[in-house]
Structure formats: structure tokens, C-alpha cells
Image (spheres, rainbow, N blue to C red):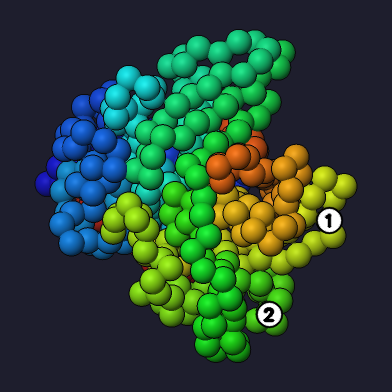
Amino acid sequence: MNPVRSVRTTDYHTAGEPFRIVDTAAERLPPVPGGTAAERCTTVIGPGGSGTAPRQGALDDVRRLLVQEPRGHTGMYGGFVVPADDDGAHFGVVFWHKDGYSTTCGHGTMALGVWAVDTGRVAAPDDGDAHVRIDVPSGRVTATVHRGGGRTTGVTFRNVPARVGARKVPVATSLGLAEVDIAHAGACYASVSARDLGLDVSRAALPALVRAAQEIRAAVATHPATWHPGGPLLSGVYGVILHQELPDTPVGPHQRNVTVFADGQVDRSPCGSGTSARLALLAEDGRLAPGEDLLHESLTGTVFTGRILEGAVTEVTGTAYRTGEHTFLVDPHDSVGVGFSLGGL
């Protein structure tokens, strides 16, 4: 008999990317040992593991139940709501995806901010802003929920400071030589111009984009620039961003990207923390000045706008909408149990 019998979730999408929320206290799930979101993330990953290492245990059974078929899919993302690190935040979160756990998630932070307002966990005005402070494994972040006429009209994610790790790292791929930029923005991202590999950022090119991203991630996995001073939890390449230049807008650069993370998972949104990494690189290039915005498109046509503030702090604005509330069940006689994955099929 599988120990997971049922679990309730509230689902959102942020610019097309799903986010499945599980309130661990309300669901009476086992508490995650640790005094901070970072310590709890380390606990669920397990000793000596990475964010995509195999795990066991009751909480990971819940993750697998919610991301695997037949209840989930290979593009699913979500988070366990846990206690805040201290009284300075409203709550904490441990982010997860189909392959494991992550230290940051911009689109998830945005969805959680809207969820906190929707559920009354954080009070919000009919007109104005509500600031939802959330402890994530990479630090404390804020989702500012914008309200007008009694409804939520948008949400802005303020991330931990971003920093550039390395520029123009040469990487040989099956499509030719790529020059890779590395930046940290709560997680480590490698950025590559898709055009340099003879690709455009389009749905038709997606299989080739994913293959190239996986080659690049493997090639720079041990590069010194992927190391973070905060230690191994924040180190190592989490995602690869393949981007394409579009004509500038009157207020700044315009790009389209696809972000491939974990073991080939594709972000349906422009990627919140990945946008932060792009902002740091554009600012260092002198292409993004204070007061200017990056218009950042996804493969699905959804858009984030991003800006860089003092101290390399970034803000990313978009929309998040609730898509459903679910009670997922496991019949004790069901041999499929918490599910299965067919990978990219």
C-alpha cells in the first residue's frame, strides 16, 4: 500500500508556466527538518545529492505524485509551503519540479504572491499593492501583488541580487562553437544566443534547442564560475537560456528566450529568475540602463518585463492566474501508485 493517500493543491499559471501549491501544514504532511528554507531544501534533496538526485521519503512521494503521470506531466512545477525563516516573512517555500528541487523560482514566487492574496493569507487593498515576503532557499524575495478595482492586475517579483560569473566561455556543441555567459540569480544560468547555433527561438526548433541546452549544461557543469559563495546548494548550472534578439522597444531591449532546466524541462514562461540573470548580463553590457525595461518573451508568446535596480537587485513583472483546486487520490489497490514518467514523449 502506498503511504500517500490524498493531497490537496491549488494550481496557478504564471505566463503559461504551471505552479502547483501544497500547504504542508494544512495537509498535515511531515514537517521538513530545518530552520530555514535553505536548510529544508537541503533536507529534502538528501546528503550528497544535487537538485536532481533521486530521493526517497514521504514528502518526495507527494512531489512525484503531483508531477508524474497520470496526475501531472513533464512540464509541471510546484512548491511546498513551509514556515518562514523568521517573523520577517509571511511564509517559506521549497520549490520542486519533475526531476527534483530548486533554490529559486520566479514564476512560482509570483504565483505564491497572488495565492497569498486570493486566500486572505496576506491582506490586500482593492486598489494598490500588497507586498508578500517569502523565504526561498536562495534568500528572501518579495512578490508585490498589484490590485485595481478589487482584482489582481499583475504581480512583480523582486529577486535576490544577481551577479555575473563569466562571459564568453567557449563550448563545443553538435551545432558548433557556442559562447556561454554565466550568471547567478538565485540559481545559476548559462546564456547562449540561439542564432550563434544556427537556431531561432521557435516551437519548430524546440527539439534542437533542448538538445543544445543539455549539451551546454553538461559542458559547463564543473566550470569554476558556476560555483556560488553560498555553497553547494546554490552552485552548479540549473538552467540554460537560449535567447534571440528582437527589435528594441522605446523603453529598452526586447528578447525571446527558451529556458531549459533540470533534465530537459522547458519553461513555458519567460522564466522569472532566468530573466533576472539576463538583466544582470544586459546591464553589464551597457544595454540596460536604470529606468529601462527588458521586454522578455517566452516560446509560448507570454511576456515578462524586467528591470535592474541598485545593488544588482532585479524586478520582474507579469501575471498569474488560478487554474484550479484539486484533491489528488491514490487508491491503495492501484499498482501505478504515485505515477510514472515517459520523459519527453
Residue at horizontal 51 percent and vertical 54 percent from the top: 163
- The image shows residue 157 at horizontal and vertical percentages of 56, 36
Residue at horizontal 56 percent and vertical 13 percent from the top: 124
Can residue 323 be seen at all in this image of the molecule? no
Query: What mark, if any, has residue 248 been given in the picture?
Result: 1
Can residue 217 be seen at all in this image of the molecule? yes
Indicate whether 220 appears above or below 132: below
Asked which quadrant contains residue 150, the reply is top right
The reply, left or right, for residue 144 in relation to residue 254 is left
The reply, left or right, for residue 192 in relation to residue 148 is left
- N-terminal of the pair, mark 2 or mark 1, is 2
Residue at horizontal 79 percent and vertical 50 percent from the top: 252
The reply, left or right, for residue 278 in relation to residue 231 is right
What is the CA distance from the residue labelled 2 to the residue labelled 1?
Answer: 19 Å
Q: Secondary structure at mark 2?
A: helix
- The image shows residue 215 at horizontal and vertical percentages of 47, 79
Amino acid type at mark 1: Asp
Residue topped by disc 2: 196
Q: Residue furthest right?
A: 250
Residue at horizontal 47 percent and vertical 42 percent from the top: 160
> Foreground: 271 or 2?
271
Indicate whether 5 appears above or below 180: above
Amino acid type at mark 2: Asp
Q: Secondary structure at mark 1?
A: strand
Asked which quadrant contains residue 284, the reply is bottom right
- The image shows residue 24 at horizontal and vertical percentages of 27, 30
